[in-house]
Image (cartoon, rainbow, N blue to C red):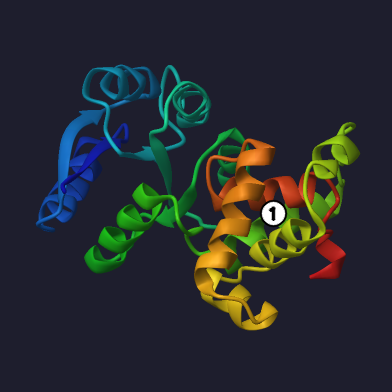
Amino acid sequence: MTIRVVVADDQSLVRAGFRVLVDSAPDLRVVGEAANGREALALTRDYAPDVVLMDIRMPGMDGLAATREITASSRVRVLVLTTFEIDEYVFAALRAGASGFLGKGVEATELHEAIRIVARGEALLSPLATRSLIARFLSGSPQITDNAGERLAELTEREREVMVMVASGLTNDDIADRLRISPYTAKTHVNRAMTKLGAHDRAQLVMIAYETGLVRPSAQ
């Protein structure tokens, strides 16, 4: 099965470079290029890609607004491209629904695997880096959502426990080892928590863990 990709960046040379990298993998194919968020949104509607590689700083509609619209109205995954991995814009993109982020200097093999992971929605890309990013920006002025208790009340104790582990950067295999359960059971708990909380993927589950106060930056 071929994973369909849209590349969104306002620099044509950057788009061309990512097209070459993506198309060099036999199971990946670029189906469109966008110079701004508006074009990315249109291509997403026209071609229904699996993943959008999204730059944030673009003219007109930026990548942040485009990410919010894409993830709110479809199951397309957004992978943010950034020059600086620890960036407030990346944090905002994760809150808007992005599944993860990559530095623009990424190697081809790492890019390929990142796209596959995000397309599956099975694992958070660079979980430790993302956890650090979230902790950094929430530690300055913690914003716990007003309905945090209501949201978490839907989870079982086991699902809460697993959610904390996901926020700590643990994989399903890691969680299975910690709890002495099978990886399949660990994945089931994670998926149930995501469904109950309306999370698109593990990245969103991590965001919710921090925003509800289930996990606090000082505890990491």
In the image, residue 96 sits, relative to residue 169, either above or below, namely: above
Q: Looking at the rendering, in which quadrant would you find the C terminus?
A: bottom right
- Relative depth, front residue between 16 and 162: 162
4 vs 89, nearest the viewer: 4
Q: Image point 58% across, 43% down: which residue?
A: 94
Residue 191: x %, y % from top left? 57, 51
Residue drawn at x 84%, y 59% is: 216
Q: Secondary structure at mark 1?
A: helix
Residue, x 18% and y 49% (percent of image)? Answer: 17
In this figure, which residue is indicated by the disc labeled 1?
A: 134
Left or right of 158? Residue 190 is left
- Please give the name of the residue rendered at 69% of the width and 54% of the height, measured from the top-left corner: 134
* Picture quadrant of residue 34: top left
User: Can you give x and y, in whole percent of width and height, for residue 98 in the image?
Assistant: 50, 41
x, y (%) of residue 198?
63, 35
Residue 86 in view:
no
Say left or right for 102 vs 176.
Answer: left
> What type is the residue that disc 1 sits on?
Ile
